[in-house]
Structure formats: C-alpha cells, structure tokens
Image (spheres, helix red, strand yellow):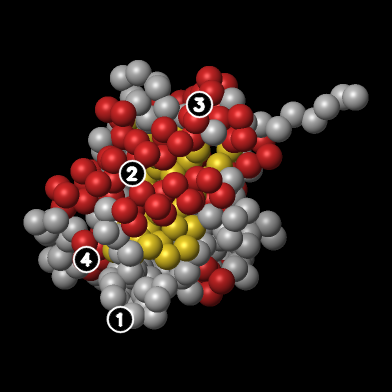
Amino acid sequence: MPIPGPDHEFEAALGRAIELVDAPDLRLPVVFASPHSGCSYPASFIASSPLDLSALRKSEDCYVDELFADVTELGAPMVRALLPRAYLDVNREPYELDPDMFDGPLPPFVNSSSARVAAGLGTVARIVATRREIYRHKLTFADVEHRLAEFYRPYHRALRMMINRARDKFGFCVLVDCHSMPSSGLPLDADSSPQRVDVVLGDRSGLSCHPLITDVIDESLRSMGYRVLRNNPYAGGFTTQHYGDPANGVHTVQIEINRALYMDEATLQRRAGFAKLRADLRMGAQALADAALEAARALRYQRLSAE
C-alpha cells in the first residue's frame, strides 16, 4: 500500500489536487475513481515544458469524471484527480521513474525497469500521448517527492478511505476505475468485423474481481448497443492490480471508453453523443450496483473458519 501522507497533506490536497465527491447517502457498495481526467495545470509545470497546453492535454482522459458524475446521485462516491496525468500519474507505482529524466542518481528502491517506464509513461511521464517530450530540462528527485506528497498520497488515501467505508458497511466493495482510450490503434471487435470497439473492461484476466462484476458491466453495455472487449488491449493498471483483492472483499475493474463516442479527439470538444453516453453509464452503474447487492454473499470477505 502507498504510505498515507500526514493529515495536513491530505487536507491541503482536497480541492486543489483531488476532489472527493461523496454521495449524499451511501446506498451502494461501489466506489468510482477518475485518475486521469484532471485538467488543472500548475503554471510552473507548463513553464517547464516546450509544449503548449493543448499538446499537454492530449494525455488527459477528458471529461471522464463528468461522464460518471451521476453515480453520486445513485448513492456511490467518486474520487477524482484535479491535477493532470502529464504532471503525475496516480495510476502507477509511486516510484516508476526513468533515470534519464533526472539530474542525478535515483534511490535503489525506484522501479526503472517497468514496461511503462520504457514507454515513457512512468509515474512522472517523459512524453505525452502524441509521443512528444514533456520537459525542457532534467528533473530532480525532490520534484518527485513534492508531487507524491501533494497529489499521489492524498489521492490514494481518499481512495482507500472510500473503499474501507463501503466494505465496513456492506461487507465488500466494488471499485470501478474509469478511463478513456484513443479511437485509433484499437483491436477489432470480438467477431473480427471492422467495427469500432466502444469499451474495454479490464479485470486482470479475472484476478482483480469476482467474474460477476465484469459480466454484469459487459452485459449491461452490450444490451445498450455498445461493443465491448475484455482485457485487450487494457487488462488493468496499478489501481486494478493494487486494490483488487476479491478474497478480502475488494473487487476492482477498469473501464476504458472510446473517446470518439463523446468527444472530438483533435479539438477536445464534447460531441452530441456525450449526454446519451452519460445517461447510459448511469444505467450501467445502477445495474452493477443492483447485481452486486443481490450477490453480496459471494462478494463479501471470505473469512476462514477456525474449526
């Protein structure tokens, strides 16, 4: 688990780096997270980059937090990032870092060999989604520690708080990690027809949640006409792997939504289909919650008998 920061770190981050959108009445054992929709860019970060703001924003999961915003009315909380993914990626290990980005040696505990680091997309990314370099100059390790304290640790503290609260009340929690994906470069639909893939569900090939969870989301979206794939090409990131613990009553699934469904990927403007997709995701969230409550016994923490 990431080490929770001091209380003052968490309190300072609320409203600046993260937002905890609580449900008026906690009625559902589901928590939603939007780690990559943040669009509040620190001026110092923009100044450190040769890229303009429009180029930096290409890494965002634009408007994903808005697409899922109705879940709080249903009775489920949402944890959303306010600072952007290009600044720090909270869906990574805390220290997935590229040594070539820094002005001195990194501590030995740093993970510099992950596939994400090799791709330029570590905790502190080297490139944006269009593969352009983010920084003019080398960074210091102190830069990383500052970003972890102001953003990463408070985000994960909020997420763990909401998970624990739901599990304490219902005996289990379903965490839905919400993302968007570019429309280009996706695999064909499951029947190999040249149709657009609308949604990819990632449950680490069944390891991060009870199969009921993925099945219900899949079936609900398909019934509304969406084309859904599982674990290809996105099987789940750090959040899915780190929090998914079905044996202890925490079921985590990642959902990736094709951006072409709701936005113009060049201009980042919402498309006419935005409202319909938002309404459909609300219905999907309700279907998931209803099914989870009905199957609560199977989803709860499986206590071992002392006999």
Residue 260, which numbered label?
4
The amino acid sitting under disc 2 is Gly
Q: Is residue 110 above or below residue 80?
A: below
Residue 227, picture quadrant: bottom left
Disc 4 and disc 1 in contact, CB within 8 angstroms: no
Q: Secondary structure at mark 2?
A: helix
Disc 1/disc 2 C-alpha distance (Å): 25 Å
Residue at screen point 37% across, 30% down: 77
Residue 284, which numbered label?
2
Measured from the top left, where is residue 216 in percent x and y?
A: 44, 47
The amino acid sitting under disc 1 is Pro
Q: Residues within 10 Å of mark 4 (few under 14, many from 20)?
A: some
Measured from the top left, where is residue 263 in percent x and y?
A: 17, 61
Q: Earlier in the sequence, mark 1 or mark 2?
A: 1
Disc 2 and disc 3 in contact, CB within 8 angstroms: no
**Which of the two discs, 2 and 4, sits closer to the camera?**
2
